[in-house]
């Protein structure tokens, strides 16, 4: 993902995350899912909501979740109390 994640595209962003999570074969599980947001210049509350929903889906599948943030995304996630997603 590159650019901004805000009200205009957060639903499509969430759909892409969920599709990627569920892309494994039915009898396989995605062990670790990393969201690359290094090219994101703005993450609004709707983008954070999309990440939270996708994280819940990943947790329900037993999938480890990690976000590779740009500097601004890291700030937004820490402000939202989600900074643990950026830790290795």
Image (spheres, rainbow, N blue to C red):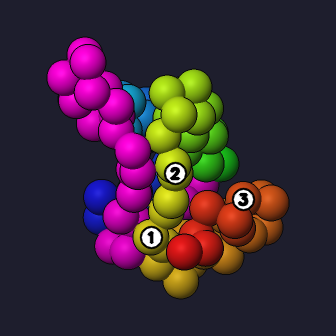
Residue 21 coordinates in the image, percent (x, y): 34, 34
Q: Residues within 10 Å of mark 3 (few under 14, many from 20)?
A: some
> Quick check: 60 above or below 51?
above
Is 35 situated left or right of 28 in this image? right
Query: Which is more N-terminal, label 1 or label 3?
Result: 1
Quadrant of the rendered image containing residue 22: top left
Question: For mark 2, what is the residue?
Answer: 65
Q: Is residue 58 left or right of residue 36?
A: right
Q: Of helix, strand and loop, which one carries label 3?
A: loop
Image point (54%, 75%), residue name: 88
Q: Return the residue at label 1.
A: 68
Which residue is nearer to you in this view: 15 or 57? 57
- Mark 3 or mark 2: name the one nearer the start of the chain: 2
Q: Nearer the viewer, residue 27 or 14?
A: 27
Q: Circle 2 — which element?
A: strand
- Quadrant placement of the N terminus: bottom left
Q: CA distance from mark 3 to mark 1?
A: 12 Å
Q: Is residue 7 visible?
A: no
Taking the magenta stretch, the answer to whether it contains residue 6 is no
Q: Which residues are magenta?
A: 20-44
Q: CA distance from mark 3 to mark 2?
A: 11 Å
* Residue sitting at the far bottom: 71
User: Residue 66, image x and y in percent?
Assistant: 50, 59
Per the image, the residue denoted by label 3 is 82
Label 2: how many residues lie within 10 Å, few (<14), some (14-19) or many (20+)? Answer: some
Task: Name the residue: 34% across, 39% down.
Answer: 30
């Amino acid at each position: 993902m590159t650019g901004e994640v805000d009200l205009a595209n957060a639903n499509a962003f969430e759909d892409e995350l969920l599709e990627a999570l569920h892309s494994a074969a039915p009898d396989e599980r995605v062990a670790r899912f990393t969201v690359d947001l290094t090219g994101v210049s703005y993450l609004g509350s709707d983008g954070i909501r999309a990440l939270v929903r996708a994280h819940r889906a990943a947790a329900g599948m037993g999938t480890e979740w990690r976000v590779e943030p740009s500097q601004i995304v890291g700030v937004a996630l820490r402000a939202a109390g989600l900074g643990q997603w950026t830790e290795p």
